[in-house]
Every structure is written in C-alpha cells, then in structure tokens.
C-alpha cells in the first residue's frame, strides 16, 4: 500500500508537467481526487488494513492528498498568470505611450468680431437687445417706413414663410421692437443672424450676421452719429483710420449715409483690395426718419435719433484680410484654428 501511494504521487508529478491549460488540471483532479479517483479509492481501502498499519498509511495518504491539491492549485495559478500575460500582449497596449491630447476649441471669427463690437458699444453706454429671426412683415418693412409697394421690398429678397411672416433680412426690425417697449432715452445694439435669398458667392451667403445700433433722445443729431461711429472705427480698425460719410438712401433714415473706412491695406492711396478708390464701405446709417418715430408713438418734435447697421462677415473679412465669405461657414478647422 505504501508503495502504491508513492507510485501515485510520482505519476501525478510527472503528469503535472504536461499540463497545458485549466482543463488539464480539472482532468487530473477528477482522475486522482474525484469520487472514483486513485487517491479516493485508496482511502476507501484503509478499512481493510490492520489496526496497526491503518494510522500510518492513513496519515501518508491524507498528506499525499493535500500535496496533490497543492500541486494542482500551484499549477492553476501559474496557468492563469500565463493566460493573462498572453491576453495583455494580444491587446497590444503600450501603457508607456503618452495619451492623446483633446483638441481645444477656439471662438469662431464671427463670434470674435461680434464680441469685440459689442464691447465697444457697451463701453459707450449702449445696451444689448435682441429680436426674433422669424419676423413679422410689419416690423421688418411697414414700421420701418417701407410700405407695401416700396421697391426696397424687392431689393431685400427675403425668405417668406407666409404672406406676413419672413426670415428677417436685416436686424433693423429690432429698432422697432425696442422702441415699442421702451421710452427714450434709448441706446441699444442688437446682433444676430439674417437671411436673404442670395446665391452664394465669395461675398454673399444666404445666412449672415448683422449688428444694428439705435440711439434716441432729445437733441440727437447727425453729429452724434459721426462721433460715435468714428470712435467705433478707430477702436475696431486702428486710430489712424479715416472715416467718410457719403449720402445713402435707406427708407427708415433721413438723411441716410453709407459709411466708409480708409483702406486697411493701402491706407487710402488706392490698391486692388479697395478697387483703387482708397475707401471700403462698412455700413449704412442715418438720422431716424420721423415717420419711424411716429410708428412707435414717439413724438418726432420732442425726440430724434440715429441708427446704423453693418454686416459682421464684412467687418471680419476686412479686419482679418479674408477674401471669401464661404470660409466662415465651411468649418474647415485649418481656417478656424487661426483665430
Ligand atoms: N438694414 C440695412 C441693410 O440691411 C442697414 C442699415 C442702414 C441699418 C441704415 C440702419 C441704417 O440702421 O440706419 O442694408
């Protein structure tokens, strides 16, 4: 019996060297320690031994059983470790590589320009206002002294939703909405999206942004308009810029003006960028038409005002030297990241 036990032990030790995976271990466990396993069968035979032999053999057998259990456990741990290493190698992650950086976003150039313009006018005592992009015909035309048969309605080529509702083609209707809700003095600017049925090219986009300004108070004159806009141009484009006011027609102002800035490239001498005239047009402006004041219930005898409106894309193109408006809306990161 003692020899048999030693034999079993030798056998399992040599078999354990051939173990390749967890299944092999389970097989050996059944073969030796299972219900019909070699060790179990020997244990059962203990009863047939003489009382003298039994304790010694019993002890030997139990110790052998423990040794086998330990051996199999050790093998199991080894195999699990190897399996894990293999799996990690297969995954091919080099944890010493530096992590991937998340790109940081930058503000869109149009937003930068809007912010800058807002800051300039806020510092001059203006307040921010806003109005809806889906606008009533009344606010966009009627109340701005553009009656039904007025040719300016064709010029503006708007997107209509119904006969009386349209996507606003300008921010000027915010003037009316503001004056309807406030008593003078009024000093506001309003920025936002505008829409026109323009074919897209290097200077036209069906959606663009405008900045509208309005000041109404007692004794406001064209001189105030010139002063404020000159300060604006100097802060936006530089102190050495010249500003020019040319007569211009807009139904809601009288007199109306188109405002030019001396060319940013040639400084006024004339170059390709300004069409050899030395000036670049940047906005429309004027003294608020008495009819507009009447429409909102202001007394034109008591109050007067000035208004102006400009395109954010045009300002950004001049400021940053961009020659195609489409760049603002294509969202090519190589373009956007420069700002
Ligand atoms: N709304 C005009 C446009 O889109 C721009 C404009 C001109 C606004 C004169 C004004 C203004 O407030 O006084 O062409």
Image (cartoon, rainbow, N blue to C red):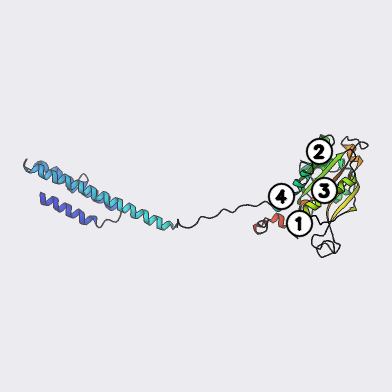
Secondary structure of the residue carrying tag 3 is strand
Q: Residue at x 65, y 52 (%)?
A: 106
Say whether disc 1 or disc 4 marks the residue closer to the N-terminus.
Answer: 4
Characterize the local packing of mark 4: few (<14), some (14-19) or many (20 or more) Cα atoms within 10 angstroms. Answer: some
Q: Nearer the observer, disc 1 or disc 4? A: 1
Q: Residue at x 82, y 45 (%)?
A: 213
Please report contact status of discs 2 and 1: CB closer than 8 Å, yes or no. Answer: no
Secondary structure of the residue carrying tag 4 is helix
Q: CA distance from mark 2 to mark 1?
A: 30 Å
Residue 111 tag number:
4
Q: Is residue 107 left or right of residue 190?
A: left
Q: Is residue 63 visible?
A: yes
Q: Residue at x 16, y 52 (%)?
A: 8
- Residue at mark 1: 319
Across and down, in percent, residue 23 comes to 29, 52
Residue closer to the observer: 94 or 201: 94
């Amino acid at each position: 019996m003692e020899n048999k036990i030693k034999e079993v032990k030798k056998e399992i030790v040599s078999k354990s060297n051939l173990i390749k995976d967890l299944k092999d271990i389970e097989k050996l466990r059944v073969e030796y320690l299972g219900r019909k396993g070699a060790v179990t069968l020997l244990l059962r035979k203990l009863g047939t031994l003489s009382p003298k032999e039994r304790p010694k053999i019993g002890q030997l057998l139990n110790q052998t059983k423990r040794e086998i259990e330990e051996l199999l456990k050790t093998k199991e741990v080894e195999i699990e470790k190897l399996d894990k290493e293999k799996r990690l190698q297969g995954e091919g992650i080099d944890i010493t590589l530096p992590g991937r950086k998340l790109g940081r976003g930058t503000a869109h150039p149009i937003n930068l320009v809007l912010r800058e313009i807002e800051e300039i006018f806020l510092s001059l005592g203006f307040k921010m206002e806003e109005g809806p992009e889906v606008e009533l015909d009344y606010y966009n035309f009627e109340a701005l002294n553009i009656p039904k048969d007025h040719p300016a309605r064709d010029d503006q080529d708007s997107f209509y939703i119904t006969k009386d509702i349209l996507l606003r083609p300008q921010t000027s209707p915010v003037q009316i909405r503001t004056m309807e809700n406030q008593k003078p003095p009024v000093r506001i600017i309003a920025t936002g999206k505008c829409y026109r049925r323009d074919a897209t090219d290097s200077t036209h986009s069906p959606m663009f942004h405008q900045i509208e300004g309005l000041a109404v108070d007692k004794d406001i004159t064209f001189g105030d308009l010139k002063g404020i806009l000159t300060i604006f141009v100097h802060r936006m484009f530089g102190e050495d810029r010249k500003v020019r006011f040319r007569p211009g027609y807009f139904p809601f102002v009288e007199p109306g003006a188109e405002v030019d800035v001396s060319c940013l490239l040639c400084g006024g001498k004339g170059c390709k960028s300004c069409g050899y005239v030395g000036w670049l047009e940047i906005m429309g402006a004027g003294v608020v038409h008495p009819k507009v004041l009447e429409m909102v219930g202001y007394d034109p005898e008591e109050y007067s005002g000035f208004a102006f409106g400009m395109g954010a894309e045009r300002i950004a193109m001049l400021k940053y030297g961009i020659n195609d408006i489409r760049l603002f809306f294509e969202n090519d990161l190589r373009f956007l990241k420069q700002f």
